[in-house]
Amino acid sequence: MSTKKVLVTGGAGFIGSHLVDALLLRGHDVVVYDNLSSGRKEFLDHCMDRIEFLRRDLVTDKGLAGLLKNINHVYHVAANPDVRIGADDTWTSVEQNIMATYNLLEAMRIARPDTPPSISFTSTSTVYGNATMLPTPEDYGPLMPISQYGASKLAAEALISAFSDNFGIKASVFRFANVVGSRSTHGILFDLYHKLKKDPKRLEILGDGLQRKSYIHVSDCVEGLLHATETQTSMFEYFNLGTDDYAVIKQIPGIVIDAMGLKNVELHYTGGHKGAGWKGDVKYMSLAIDKILATGWRYRYNSIETLKKAVREIISDLEQ
């Protein structure tokens, strides 16, 4: 891909900040857009002199179209990232994931009606819900998400599809497996670490421990996202992005305990919601990734290797 001026929404977040790093390495002119509701400006401290940082909100920003006039490509990463809150808070995902995406697309349409910017959207494997086909391919259906988060991401996908067809916006949608690594601010590794810091003798794990899920390291995830975006030739594409294996949740506490140097920890499984961790948690998730592999991309770390690497990074982040 030739040098471009790109906008990264949610660029101060976990995945977004790693994406910013990778784009800078490719020589792109990067504008980071983040309201810092979940992102952290310190994730960008090392590169603030090489980016343009805008603290603005996609839901309320009236100047989006003006900003997008000189943008070649948008990486839309901004979202409410917490899947679990949907059981109690049904509005945040609607506002931060659906309305924010609509406002962005509408601004893209208005900014340059004849040659709108292209877009890559970070969606989620949770759009598949409790899929009956594992590994799950991109053309699986019907899609029946079981969380507010998954539902809102699916709605955003649909908006992007419609805007792409109606207004000539080149677009790609990426359905991520569980992404882990440095700068994590939530997720199972982050949670287990904090629980063990509070009580190093007893660890509570949500669910029955039999859940099976794919995990991808954030570095592999970002490289897959960029590679597929850079090689895409069609106007609209969906890609699953993850590994072609999985980890059983019961394997994860030991990985965290070993990395923290602890011994004789009593494990307690809550049983959760129908064996899953919470309402809206997909118990079994494994993605068919043949489509993105066909582009020439390969992941470096399988699920277990990813978890081991990520927990070391998270411990380093939190204890430095």
Image (cartoon, rainbow, N blue to C red):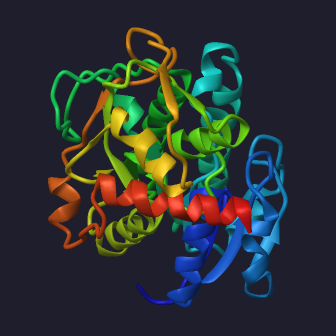
Q: Residue at x 36, y 49 (%)?
A: 215
Question: Where the N terminus falls, by quadrant?
Answer: bottom left
Count of marks overlaid on the render: 0
- Position of residue 144 measured from the top left corner of the image (x, y, whole percent): 35, 19
- The answer to whether residue 242 shows anywhere in this view is no
Quadrant housing residue 141: top left
Looking at the image, is 55 positioned above or below residue 157?
below
Q: Quadrant of residue 19?
A: bottom right
Q: Which part of the image, by quadrant, shows the C terminus?
A: bottom right
Q: Is residue 16 visible?
A: yes
User: Relative to 234, does residue 123 appear above or below in the rendering?
Assistant: above
Q: Is residue 240 left or right of residue 315?
A: left
Hey, which residue is sitting farthest front in the picture? 264
Q: Please, is residue 114 above or below residue 21 in the view?
A: above
Tell me which residue sits at (14%, 65%) in the image. Answer: 294
Can you give x and y, in whole percent of width and height, for residue 157 in the image? 44, 39
Q: Position of residue 186 (x, y in %)?
A: 62, 43
91 displayed left or right of 259 = right
Residue 57 in the image: above or below residue 120: above
Q: In the picture provided, is 103 more to the left or to the right than 303? A: right
